[in-house]
Image: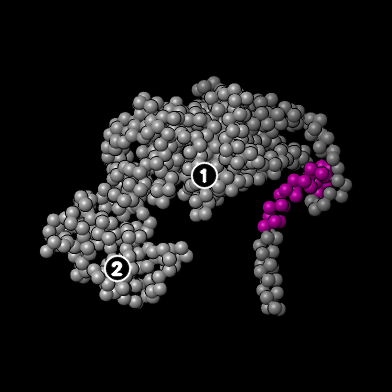
Amino acid sequence: MAMNTWRKAGTEAKLLLIGIPLFIWTMLPIYHLCLFAFSSKDEAMGGRLWPEHPTLHNFEVVFREQHHYLNHFWLQMWNSLFIAVTVGVLTLVVATSAAFAISRLKVRGGRTVMNLALFTYFIPAAFLAVPMYKTMGVYGLLNNQWALILAMTTIAAPYSIWVLKQASDKLPWELDEAAKMDGASPLQLFRLVYLPLMTPSLVAIGTYSLLLAWNEYLYAFLLLSNDRDVTLGVALGNFLAADDSPWELLMTTGLIYALPPAAIYYTFKRYMVGGLTAGAVKS
Amino acid sequence: MATVSFQNIEKSFGHTKVIQGISFDIREGEFMVLVGPSGCGKSTLLRMLAGLEEITGGTIAIDDKVVNDIESKDRDIAMVFQSYALYPHMTVGENMAFSLKLRKADPKMMADRVAHASKILNLDPYLERFPRELSGGQRQRVAMGRAIVRDPKVFLFDEPLSNLDAKLRVAMRAEIKALHQRLKTTTVYVTHDQVEAMTMADRIVVMHDGRIEQIGAPLELYDHPDNLFVAQFIGSPAMNVMNGKVRRAGGSAHVEVAGGVRWPLSHGPGAEGQAVAYGIRPGDLRLASPDAEGAVSAEIVVVEPTGAETELLIQAGDDQLILVTHGRPKVNPGERIGLTIDPAKVHVFDQGTGARLAA
C-alpha cells in the first residue's frame, strides 16, 4: 500500500518535473507580452516582474490611434480580418470542390492532383515568396490585397484538399448510391448530402486557412507596402524600424492581434479535433 | 408492378469476367431471390439492374423497355442497401421524403406517402428521430420505408439482413415477405443465405462463378437439384455426398464408395462402373438396428439434440454423414447402428460434370 503511494507520487513528480519547465517555457513570452501591455513605458523597461501600477493607458493609445505607428490601427485590423476571412472562404470553396470531385465523383487525374498537392510540401513556402512576388507583378496585382489573398489561398489549398479528401473517403459510398437512386444529381448530392456530413472537417479547414492568413507575415510584407493596405501583422513589424521603438505599444497591439485567433480556436476546438480525426471510429 | 428481363448479361472488371452471359426473366409481382456464395456475381447483377454498375454486354429490360442507357433515377426502381445507407443528418421522415423532395413532389402528397409508409412499417413514433437514435431493425425499416415511399416498379434488396443479429433477421424476414404480399411489387432480393432464399422467394436463381446453376421454386430446387452445386448449396444441414461407382448385378443396383460401403440405388440412373456423386439429404436417412435387412452399418460419432430435432454425426465406411431426425433417438457416441435409405430419395450426379443423372 505504502509502496504504491510512493510509486504514484514518484510518477507524479516526474510528470511535474517535465510539465513545469514546459509551462514556464510556453507562458514566459506571453507573460512578457501582457506585462508590457499593462505597464507604463518607464516601468516596462525597468525589468520588473510585476507591474507596480498596472494601467490600461496603452490600450487607450492603441484604440484611439494616438501614435504615428498606429495611425491606421483599425483599418489594418480590418485588412487582416478581411484577408483572413476571404482566404478561409476561398480555400474552402477550392478545397471542397476538389475533394468532392476527386473522392466522390472519381474524376480522371484525381490521383495526380493529390500527388501534386503532396509534392508542394517539399518546397517551403518561404522559397516561393520571391517567385510569387514576380508572378503577382506580372499580373499587376502588387500592392493589391487580392495578391495576398490569392497567394495565401494557394499555400493553404494543398493541405486543405488533402485533409478534405481523406475525410471524404471515409463517408460511406452507399450514401452516394442511395442518393443517386433517390434521384439526386451530382450537385444535389454535393449540397444536400455531402456538405452537411462534411461540416466538422469544413469548419476545421476553414479555421486552419483563416488562421494561416491571419498569422502570415512574410507574404503580407512582400506583396503589400502601402500603409493603408497592409495587415496588422506587417504594421507590427514596422514598429521595429526605429531605434527607439515604443515597446509597450507594440506589445499591446500584439496582444490585441493575438486575441481573435485564440477566440476562434476555442470556439471551434471541438470541430478542429473532431474534423481532423473524423471517421476514425465507425459510427 | 413490372417485369424484368436479363438477356445475355456480361460484366467484366478489367480483364476479369465476373458475369458470363446470364439470361432470365422475372415475372410481374414476383419475389425473385438471387443466391450464391460470395463472389458469384449476384450483387453485381443487382447493381447493374439498379444502374450503379455499367453493363459490359447484353441488355436489361424493365417492362420490355431496355434500360441499359437510362440513369438510375429514371428507371423507377428503389433499393435497400446492406448498410441501410440512411442519411445521418436527416430525420427518419426526411430520409423517407428525400426522393420525393428531389422530384419536387407536392408537399401534401409527400406527407401522405410518408405517413402511409411509416404506418405500414410501424415507424410512426420515430419520424422525428435521427438514424443514430434507432436500433438496427428500425434502421432497416426506415431503409425499406424510403423505398416504399417511391412506389417504384421494382424493389431491389442487397443483402438487407446481413447486419442484423440472428433473431431479428428471422423477424425481418417475415416482415419483408408480408410487405411483399401486401404491396405485390416485383422484387429482386440478393442474399448469400440459402435459408433466406428458401423462406422468402417465389423463385430462386442459384448463381455460381458468374453463371446460373438453376432457376426454380424453392422446393423444386430442394427436391430436384439440377447439379451437385445446387444440391449442396440448398438445404441446411447440407446434403450428404459420397463419391463412388455404380454397380449393377443380378437385378439390384448400388453405389460402392471408398471403404467398401454399398449404398442402395433405384434402377434408373448411372451405367455400370460410372463414377458418380451419391447424395442423400440428412432428413432422408433413417436409423435402424445394425443387423436390419439392407441396412448400411455405421457408428455414431456425435449426438446434437436441439429439442424438436436431433442431429447425428455418423461414420459410415470412410465417409462422415449427418442425419437429422425428429424426436430423440436413444443412441450414444460409439454405438453401432444401421442406416436405411429409400432409393427414390437419392440424388445421383455425374462426378465429372456434376450434372444430375436422370432418375
Q: Quadrant of the N terminus of chain A?
A: bottom right
Q: Residues at marks 1 and 2, common chain?
A: yes
* Residue A135 seen from this side: yes
Give the residue at mark 1: B175
Q: Which chain is home to disc 1?
A: B
- Judge by depth and name the residue closer to the eye, B18 or B80: B80
- Image x and y of residue B329, in percent: 40, 70
- Judge by depth and name the residue closer to the eye, B309 or B84: B309
Whichever of labels 1 and 2 marks the residue nearer the N terminus, that label is 1
Q: Does A72 appear above or below B337?
A: above
Q: Would residue B48 appear left or right of A233 to someone viewing this image?
A: left
Residue at the image point whose x is 42% and y is 41% from the top = B189
Q: Does B193 appear above or below A140?
A: below
Q: Give the amino acid at mark 1.
A: Glu
- Image x and y of residue A72, in percent: 74, 28
Residue A13 image-quadrant placement:
bottom right
Q: Would residue B286 appear left or right of A200 to someone viewing this image?
A: left
Helix, strand or loop at label 1? It is helix
> Which residue range is magenta in the image?
A22-46
Mark 2 surroundings within 10 Å by alpha-carbon count, few (fewer than 14), some (14 through 19), many (20 or more): many
Residue at the image point whose x is 51% and y is 37% from the top = B182
Q: Does A91 appear above or below B126?
A: above
Q: How is the image coloured?
A: one colour
Q: Which chain is home to disc 2?
A: B
**Which label was assigned to residue B211?**
none
Q: Give the amino acid at mark 2.
A: Leu
Residue B343 image-quadrant placement:
bottom left
- Image x and y of residue B113, in percent: 58, 30
Give the residue at mark 2: B339
Helix, strand or loop at label 2? It is strand
Q: Is residue A36 magenta?
A: yes
- Judge by depth and name the residue closer to the eye, A77 or B33: B33
